[in-house]
Image: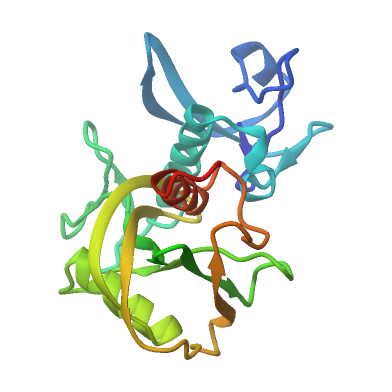
Amino acid sequence: MLFRSKILMSFDSAGRWQPATAASLEPFEIERRHFMGYLGNVGCYVTEVSDALDAEFADLRAHLEDFDSLMFNLVGRALQICDWYRTHQYCGNCGKKTKQHDVDRAMVCGSCGLHFYPRLSPSIIVLVHRHDEVLLGRNHLFPPGLFSTLAGFVEPGESIEETVRREVFEEVGVNVGSVEYRGSQPWPFPNSLMLGFHAEYKSGDIVLQEDEIAEADWFPLDRLPNIPGKFAISRWLIDDYLSRRGLPI
C-alpha cells in the first residue's frame, strides 16, 4: 500500500516487513490499484490510497534494513509501476491523454498510438581493486565518513564495459584494466538497474570530479572505512572481493 510514494510500514511478529492484506485496506479510500504479478501462487497488487489516516507510511530508502531481498524487490516494483503510471498520463509526442493498454504494461496515446512502457535506467557500480587495496569514494550526498563503490548511468551508444571505464576515469581520474561482471540489483530510486563489476586498477592517480565526489582514497582490505550495509550491491561487491582474497566478511 502506498500513500504519496511512501510505503505502509507493517511488520509481522518477528519484526519483518510484510505486505498489506485485503483486510488492512478496508479503512482506506483507494485511488488506484495495479496488478504486479504473482508471488508463488498469490496475486500481488500495489494500491495507492488518498489519505494516510493514522497509519505509518515511510520512504523505502530510509528503511532498507527492514526488508529482505524478496520484499525489497516487491516494494521496488510497486514504486516503479506507480511512478510510471503517474508520469505518463499524457503523450510526450502530441500531448494528448493516454490510457492503459488492455494487455501489456503500457500507456497508449489514443491520438497518435505511441506506447509508453515502464522505464529502466541501466547503471554500473564498480569496485576498483589493486591487490590488497580497494578504491572507495564518498559522494557529496553521503553522510560524513561513509564510503562506497563508484557508480554511474550508461550513456547512449555505450557498452556496459565502456561505461565502467568512463565513469571511473571521470569520477576519480583512474584507468582500469580487466572488468568482471559480478551481479545486479534492481534499485527503484526511481528506476535504476544496477549492474555490478570488479575492475582491476591499471594506471593513474586519484583526481576527483569535485562536483560529484567529495573524497576518494585507496583503503587496505583490513582497514576499511564505514561502508554501506549488507543489503546494498556496493557491499556485495566489497564482501565478494574480501572473500576472494581469503579475508573474513
Classify residue 158 as left or right of residue 106. Answer: left
Residue located at (56% from left, 30% from top) = 68
Q: Residue furthest right?
A: 54
Q: Is residue 209 left or right of residue 20?
A: left
Q: Residue at x 35, y 83 (%)?
A: 169
Judge by depth and name the residue closer to the eye, 43 or 173: 173
As rendered, which of 75 and 201 lies closer to the eye?
Answer: 201
Q: Residue 52 sits in which quadrant?
A: top right
- Which image quarter holds the N terminus? top right
Looking at the picture, how far across and down is residue 199, in whole percent? 31, 65
Residue nearest the observer in this picture, 169 or 61 = 169
Q: In the rendered image, is residue 155 in sight? A: yes
Please say if 66 is above or below 236.
above
169 above or below 199? below
In the shown orientation, is residue 148 left or right of residue 41? Answer: right
Location of the C terminus by quadrant is: top right
Q: Position of residue 71 (x, y in %)?
A: 53, 29
Residue 3 in view, yes or no: no
> Residue 72 at x, y = what percent?
52, 35
Query: Who's the residue at 37% across and 8% down the image?
Result: 41
